[in-house]
Amino acid sequence: MKKSVLTRYRVMAYVTGVLLVLLTLGVIAKYGLHIDGADTFTTFVGIAHGWLYVIYLIFAFDLGSKAKWPVAKQLWVLLAGTVPTAAFFVERKVSRELEARTADAAPAVAKA
């Protein structure tokens, strides 16, 4: 698996996670605090998060397919973009796992 597959997933995980946190704060400001301008902010961030989440899904699915993950794990990673802050924790766990797997495979390839 190429490192670029993991890198593009990581970028989209962070972007999706940040936008979801901003969206959550916007919804709190709009409905909980009744702040002026929160309506426009929530609309803009919601649309951006929605479109970028689709890209996140594509990259996460591509990563899961190339990493040969079971379906349950792949669904867990795909849904991480829908829970505020979950994308950050899942991304970190996935990155550590795949970097370790890549590091373990590299010496075997070098010896062959």
Image (cartoon, rainbow, N blue to C red):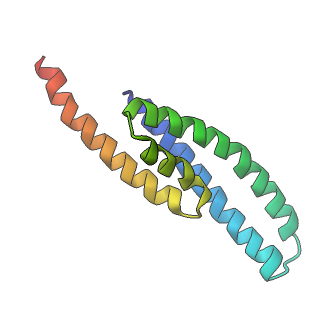
Give the residue at x 39% y 27%.
2
* Total marks placed: 0
Residue at 26%, 39% (x, y): give it. 101
Question: At which x and y percent is residue 80?
Answer: 53, 54
The image shows residue 85, relative to residue 36, as above or below, that is: above
Residue 5 at what x, y percent from top left?
45, 32
Along the viewing direction, whichever of 11 and 77 lies nearer the viewer: 77
The residue drawn where x is 31% and y is 46% is 97
What residue is shown at x 68% (from left), y 64% (from top)?
22
Q: Residue furthest left?
A: 111
Taking 16 as reference, is 68 above or below it?
A: above
In the picture as drawn, the residue positioned furthest to the top comes out as 112
Q: Nearer the viewer, residue 82 or 112?
A: 82
Image quadrant of residue 26?
bottom right
Is the residue 80 above or below the residue 110 in the image? below
Splitting the image into 4 quarters, where does residue 21 fall?
A: bottom right
Q: If the image is split into quadrants, where does the N terminus sit?
A: top left
Left or right position of 96 against 85? left
Q: Whole-percent x and y of residue 99? A: 30, 41
User: Of all residues shown, which one is farthest toward the front?
Assistant: 71
Q: Which image quadrant: the C terminus?
A: top left
Relative to residue 86, is residue 109 drawn left or right? left
In this rendering, position of residue 100 left or right of residue 56: left
- Percent position (x, y) of residue 35? 84, 78
